[in-house]
Image (cartoon, grey):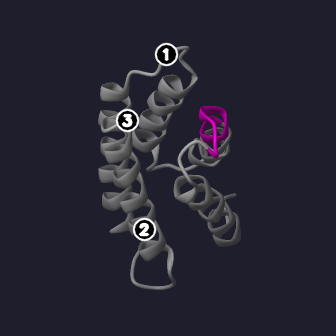
Amino acid sequence: MFTHEDASELLDSTMTVLDSEPGSTSPQDGANIIDQWLTQLHQAENAGPIAQTLEQVKEQLLKDSINSDELCQVLNTLATQTSEFSTRMGSEGDMATRLEALSAGLKLLAGQVSHA
């Protein structure tokens, strides 16, 4: 069961990777975080599309040569899905706000990837 505490810790870890200085994290760092998300998302009923997009992001990160256009596209798709998912969180707690921050971080990363 994916608890609020588990989600918060995973969101914190994800934001740490997203907010890090360019070059201070590796694609493997991103893949490791994605694996943690996938473990949790595969247990959720309504997270199939996000899990599929995360799999695509992971595939891009683990390629010998990252295609920045493809990675940018899947990061933007993931950002949109995350934002849409946040609307289903309700108004209680901070999860919707944190998911919106994650969405913004993903969009920022997509922009950095497209200009790299």
Residue drawn at x 36%, y 61% as measured from the top left: 104
Q: In front of the other: label 2 or label 1?
A: 1
In the rendered structure, find residue 45 and report the number of the disc placed on it.
none
Q: CA distance from mark 3 to mark 2?
A: 22 Å
Residue drawn at x 33%, y 68% as measured from the top left: 87
- Residue carrying label 3: 116
Placement of 9 over or under 31, stated as above or below:
below
Secondary structure under tag 2 reads helix
> Is disc 3 in contact with disc 2, using a CB cutoff of under 8 Å?
no
- Residue carrying label 1: 65
Q: Amino acid at mark 2?
A: Ala
Percent across and percent down for residue 91 are 40, 84
Magenta residues?
A: 24-31
Secondary structure under tag 3 reads loop
Q: Quadrant of residue 28?
A: top right
Percent across and percent down for residue 70 are 33, 26
Placement of 43 over or under 12, stated as above or below:
above
Q: Amino acid at mark 3?
A: Ala
39 and 21: which is toward the camera: 21
Label 3 environment density (alpha carbons within 10 Å; few <14, some 14–19, many ≥20): few
Name which of mark 3 and mark 2 comes first in the sequence: 2
Q: In front of the other: label 1 or label 3?
A: 3
88 and 16: which is toward the camera: 16
82 falls in the magenta region: no
- Residue carrying label 2: 101
Placement of 5 over or under 70, stated as above or below:
below
